[in-house]
Image (spheres, rainbow, N blue to C red):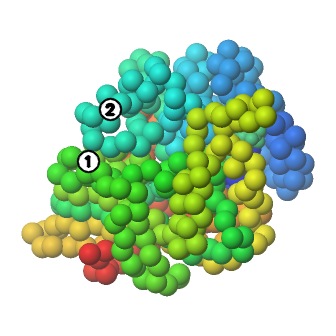
Amino acid sequence: MARLLIIGCGGVAQVAISKCCQNSDVFEEIMIASRTVSKCEAMKEKLQDKTKTVIKTAQIDADDVEALTKLIKDYAPDAVLNVALPYQDLTIMDACLAAGVDYIDTANYEPEDTDDPEWRAIYEKRCKELGFSAYFDYSWQWAYEDKFKNAGLTALLGTGFDPGVTSVFAAYAKKHYFDEIHTIDILDCNGGDHGYPFATNFNPEINLREVSAPGSYMENGKWIEIPAMSIKREYDFDGVGMKDMYLLHHEEIEALGRNMPEVKRIRFFMTFGQSYLTHMNCLENVGMLSTTPINFNGQEIVPIQFLKALLPDPASLGPRTVGKTNIGCIFTGIKDGKERSIYIYNVCDHQECYKEVGSQAISYTTGVPAMIGAMMVVTGQWKNPGVFTTDEFDPDPYMEALNKWGLPWQVVENPVLVD
Ligand code: NDP
């Protein structure tokens, strides 16, 4: 029925590709296009005898809009799924516009070079005006609204788990459980153990930038920023147990804050063990998380990229990771004049994911919603000209697809609250 061009062939992409190949009724054909074509060919080799989906591959540098536009025009897909890096979001959106094709991604734009003076001037203005200092924000992609609308094309942003499923949970809670939502706490718990002293579960550069940055949350429509890791809570997670979690800035707070202005407070917490934090602090203190190039023995290197080369590849953690993830949202508010609180969450087992698709649960919980988001767009269930996040469409078909495609969820009334 549909043809999907998938850009990137890393940890998340490999799950999205495997799930598209399980869903051949929708994805009759896919093309895997990435910087290192041998990874795309290896995925094709692994899957082609087990699926009805026809798989093609291509080499592409997604920073090159002209080459990418040509590839999209030649392959003529129904949509492009960007599971490369957030650095490529804008160039891929430009190429989709030039080729007249819908666009889907899992993470919002951030620049690779945070020292670029042109970007920095806009960033510093935003920090002052909005009050949060994360390198990533939606403004860059929301600025494409008119272009996509005028072209009659859909851009679906951030269809991973968080952001992605968490915002669908918010839309579902609003539709079925509340007249008014007052607070949203998004809780991301990874109870997995990969046995390494230190490794990140998805791209180390993106991951470490995110967790070493100041935290922030939204209260009464305003951002409140706090020093990194300075708000800590304990929570007893179903399937995992008691964990320390820390308040972080996260992108769905921005989208939910804009699209559900009636919500009084939106926060995001992620669990970390003490060993992870000690390693991260040490790496930060010695400058290894820096994105500013340095000269070493006559060669320019970016410290965080060098660190990435030393750390285990997240795609290789699958066989060694045991334990479960639990990601979801606690909502409080009013229904029929009475106070109500619910918790919607998914529990995912690292080893079950590995048995099914050869990946750990972090890649799985992102790659499955990436496939589902692409399915929503190519089947026309979520199609509207413009730029959207996942809380802006009917949540019901997406929620049904989560149950069908490996991320079943549950709703608990009167959960233990964070505070
Ligand atoms: P990886 O680093 O494992 O994979 C990235 C892939 O993109 C690699 O195959 C890489 O190629 C390719 N790539 C990078 N630059 C280019 C380029 N210029 N042109 C073409 N291909 C390129 O990352 P992950 O799979 O861990 O993450 C993928 C995305 O998922 C990221 O945007 C991340 O932020 C997002 N994510 C979202 C989550 C959510 O819940 N919403 C959670 C986790 C991740 P090569 O193989 O040559 O390096």
The answer to which quarter of the image holds residue 217 is bottom left
Visible in this render: residue 101? Answer: no
State the residue at coordinates (39%, 52%).
214
For residue 81, side relative to residue 281 (left or right) = right
- The disc at residue 223 is 1
Q: Is residue 60 left or right of residue 137?
A: right
In this view, which residue lies farthest toward the left?
337
Number of numbered discs = 2
Three-letter amino acid code of the residue under disc 2? Arg
Q: Secondary structure at mark 2?
A: helix
Q: Where in the figure is residue 31, as x and y percent of width and height?
A: 76, 36
Residue beneath label 2, please? 126
Give residue 58's mark. none
How many angstroms separate mark 2 from mark 1 (CA)?
12 Å
Query: Measured from the top left, where is residue 361 in percent x and y?
Result: 64, 66
Residue 46 left/right relative to 319? right
**Towards the viewer: 393 or 366:** 366
